[in-house]
Amino acid sequence: MEKTELKEQLKRQIIQFLNLTDLTPADIKDEEPLFGDGLGLDSIDSLELVVLLKREYGITIQDPRQGRKILVDVNTLADYIQEHGKK
């Protein structure tokens, strides 16, 4: 899958999995931080994103430090999925 398409899919999945019904994919910028001052996600949301990665892309994150490096923004997620996700 092309990276642009993957990023759009990720945005739709983030909205769906985290029940962010007041957002559209256009509201989420590729480089916007997912946590803190960016999108404003919290630790519960990070667990949901880990489940999303496992269910949709076959990626298992067991080390919280690894998760912090992956769950930065949409760009970082897409890069990691392209490199490590199921083909």
Image (tube, rainbow, N blue to C red):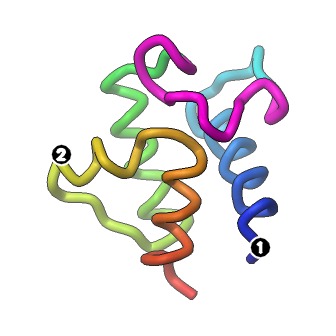
SS of the residue at dot 1? loop
Q: Is residue 51 left or right of residue 82?
A: left
Q: Quadrant of the C terminus?
A: bottom right
- Examine the image and state in which quarter residue 42 appears: top left
Magenta part of the chain: 24-39
Q: In terms of depth relative to the viewer, which is nearer, 27 or 22? A: 27
Residue 66 percent across, percent down from the top left: 23, 54
Vertical order, 62 against 17 (above or below): below
Residue 54 percent across, percent down from the top left: 42, 63
Q: Is residue 82 left or right of residue 36?
A: right
Q: CA distance from mark 2 to mark 1?
A: 28 Å
Q: Indicate which disc residue 64 carries.
A: 2
Residue 69 percent across, percent down from the top left: 31, 48
Q: Amino acid at mark 1?
A: Glu
Dot 1: within a 10 Å radius of its alpha carbon, few (fewer than 14), some, or many (20 or more) residues? Answer: few
Please report whichever mark, 2 or 1, sits nearer to the chain's N-terminal start. 1
- Examine the image and state in which quarter residue 63 appears: bottom left
x 34%, y 39%: residue: 47
Q: Indicate which disc residue 2 carries.
A: 1
x 61%, y 37%: residue: 31
Q: In terms of depth relative to the viewer, which is nearer, 71 or 50? A: 71
x 63%, y 26%: residue: 19
SS of the residue at dot 2? helix
Q: Amino acid at mark 2?
A: Pro
In the rendered image, residue 65 lying in the magenta stretch gets the answer no
Residue 20 percent across, percent down from the top left: 66, 22
